[in-house]
Amino acid sequence: MIILTIESTCDETAAAVITEQFEVLSSVVASQENLHRKFNGVVPEIAARAHVERILPVIDETLDRAGIGLSDLNAIAVANEPGLAGSLLVGVVAAKALSLAYDIPLVAVNHLQAHIFACRLAAEKNVFPCVGLIVSGGHSNLYKCNTALDFNPLGGTIDDAAGEAFDKVATMLGLPYPGGPSISKAALEGDDKAYHFPRPFLKDRQSLDFSFSGLKTAVRYELAGQGQVDFSKLDIPKQKVADVAASFQAAVVDCLASKAMLALQQSGMNTLCVGGGVAANHVLRDRLQHECSTAGVTLHIAPFKLCTDNAVMGAIAIERLKAGLVEDLSLDISPGLLRIGKS
Ligand code: KG4
Ligand code: ZN
């Protein structure tokens, strides 16, 4: 069996051709980073239009690289939740059209479950049940993942996502978008104890929630005080940029790692899977490696190229197909943060 997976939830247009044995025959990701850089964040309308322009060339290239044609496909999968409405629509409409034209099953992919499934693909063996930590530009959530398709929410951010905080703080520091990699790089030259930024809920041993909005505000006050300010005109000394970047990163990592470990304790699980763009962060990866090996927990972090959005993680569609979960042409998008439970 060969499937085509489509991903267009945010600002990457991606497709992959994958076999039933999770062999990746091809994978293409068209990033829109250049389009959004001057706005220091993803502009939904620009993202949706760019998906419209790219979706068919990306699908064509993916099939070409796999050396197959549309008529060789046995199913087509698409991420229909959660994400930006306009972006999601483009992928879903393309997938429905191909499903109708080639009379092949249509499979819905939950983007957050797919981020965790990236760990399953890299491990090349079952990783469930586990605690799942998803940290990306739009999400910072902890789930009890009973199976690949059965997630129960344990906690999550009450305001900004971790990646969003990286992106906003990078803008304040005059570092380029996307902020995660820029902050990591700047932090290499900085002292992570130079500033003590807030770590909300850290001491609360009941809560598995995060909050990154106050941390962002604390960085703002440190750089510019409380008044109105044009950050592009601030001339922050290079060492201060590095120290703030390192101290900010340390605060985010502290919160994410502590709550992930608490989730393992509370749920009695001994496997942790981590996915999403922020999972590419070296300091977070090192901290989780250390904590998990001390606690005797098996850790799976998505490999770098499967951390940020891609269509390979849409291989979770194979699991849905095996479970008989196929959609008809009434499949709709579901942009909001899901309270995912059994599918
Ligand atoms: O998963 P993703 O590609 O998109 C969403 O589904 O949101 O994640 C993108 C986010 C951005 O906010 C970016 O700044 C962050 O992941 N990111 C990082 C790193 N690389 C990407 N954050 C921290 N450290 C990194 N190395
Ligand atoms: Zn994502």
Image: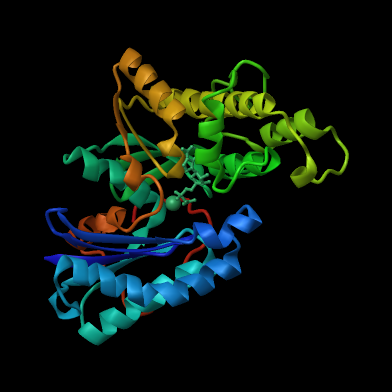
Q: Residue furthest top?
A: 294
Rendered position, 43 above or below 299:
below
Q: Residue furthest right?
A: 227
104 lies left or right of 290: left
At x 26% / y 59%, what residue is drawn? 27
Where is residue 267 shown, x and y percent of the image?
A: 38, 28
Q: Quadrant of residue 45?
A: bottom right
Colouring mode (rainbow / by chain / secondary structure / one colour): rainbow
Where is residue 300 shown, x and y percent of the image?
A: 29, 33
Front residue of 107 and 135:
135
53 lies left or right of 172: left
At x 27% / y 75%, what residue is drawn? 60
Q: Is residue 285 visible?
A: yes
Numbered marks: total: 0
Q: Quadrant of residue 62?
A: bottom left
Where is residue 293 shown, x and y percent of the image?
A: 31, 17
At x 32% / y 58%, what residue is drawn? 311
- Which quadrant holds the N terminus? bottom left
Q: Residue furthest bottom?
A: 101
Front residue of 65 and 290:
65
- Which quadrant holds the C terminus? bottom left
Q: Is residue 159 visible?
A: no
Rendered position, 212 above or below 76:
above
Where is residue 129 shown, x and y percent of the image?
A: 27, 36
